[in-house]
Image (tube, grey):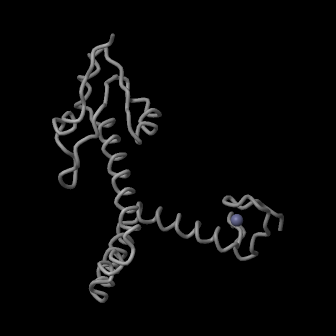
């Protein structure tokens, strides 16, 4: 069997004879990444798996009441970090929603330019479907509930400026 390169650490390794398709070496870190990646993929594609994961964490929480409350009390730094990460994910999702929101197409009639002045801008910059240009100056308003917001909610955080 020929050697190949691990797709995470890029070191050469010998694939197991039981796993001829193996593309990740046996290092603990690389295997951890592989498992986490395949779990993420499965969570996206497999409704049953998603349900099982939800149920099992619900069960775990029921058997360990107060665990996360105590954890948060003991680890205030992690609370702050998690909140920041969640806010960043929310912001990114709002920008993606905005970019995919066809009802914003009327903005194309504006001759103004889009400048996305926050962390999610990089993601939008690669989105070819955005041909309108608008100034986004304030942070977008927080999402109220699950699902899409009506367009006017998005617009609350968007102001247009005419081209100079
Ligand atoms: Zn590796």
The answer to which of 121 and 77 lies nearer the viewer is 77
- Residue 31 to residue 156: above or below: below
Asked if residue 159 lies left or right of residue 24, the reply is left
Screen quadrant of the N terminus: bottom right
* Image x and y of residue 126, in percent: 47, 34
Quick one: quadrant of the C terminus?
top left
Q: Position of residue 12 (x, y in %)?
A: 79, 63
User: Which corner quadrant of the image does residue 64 belong to?
Assistant: bottom left
Q: Residue furthest bottom?
A: 63
Instruction: Residue 115: give x, y in percent of width and height.
Output: 38, 27
Left or right: 162 as drawn, with respect to 17: left
Question: Where ligand 1 lies, by image quadrant?
Answer: bottom right
Seen from the viewer's position, the closer of residues 88 and 109 is 88
Residue at the far top in the pictured view: 164
From what the image shows, is residue 58 above or below residue 140? Answer: below
Do we see residue 21 in this rendering? Answer: no
Residue 116 or residue 13, whichever sits in front: 116
What residue is shown at x 38% (from left), y 33% (from top)?
A: 117
At 35% from the left edge and 71% from the top edge, which residue is drawn? 48
Q: Residue at x 29, y 20 (%)?
A: 108
Residue at 66 percent of width and 60 percent of height: 8
Res. 61 in view: yes
Residue 127, by quadrant, is top left
Relative vertical location of residue 67 with respect to residue 140 in this rendering, above or below: below
Q: Nearer the viewer, residue 157 or 50?
A: 157
The quadrant in which residue 45 appears is: bottom left
């Amino acid at each position: 069997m020929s050697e190949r390169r691990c797709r995470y650490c890029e070191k050469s390794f010998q694939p197991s004879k039981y796993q001829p398709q193996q593309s990740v070496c046996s290092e603990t870190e690389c295997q951890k990444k592989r498992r986490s990646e395949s779990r993420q993929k499965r969570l996206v594609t497999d409704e049953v798996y998603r349900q099982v994961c939800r149920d099992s964490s619900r069960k775990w929480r029921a058997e360990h009441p107060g665990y996360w409350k105590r954890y948060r009390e003991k680890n205030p730094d992690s609370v702050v970090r998690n909140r920041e990460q969640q806010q960043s994910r929310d912001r990114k999702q709002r920008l993606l929603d905005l970019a995919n929101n066809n009802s914003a197409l009327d903005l194309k009639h504006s001759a103004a330019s889009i400048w996305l002045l926050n962390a999610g801008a990089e993601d939008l910059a690669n989105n070819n479907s955005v041909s309108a240009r608008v100034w986004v100056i304030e942070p977008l308003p927080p999402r109220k509930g699950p699902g899409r917001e009506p367009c006017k909610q998005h617009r609350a955080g968007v102001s247009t400026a005419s081209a100079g």
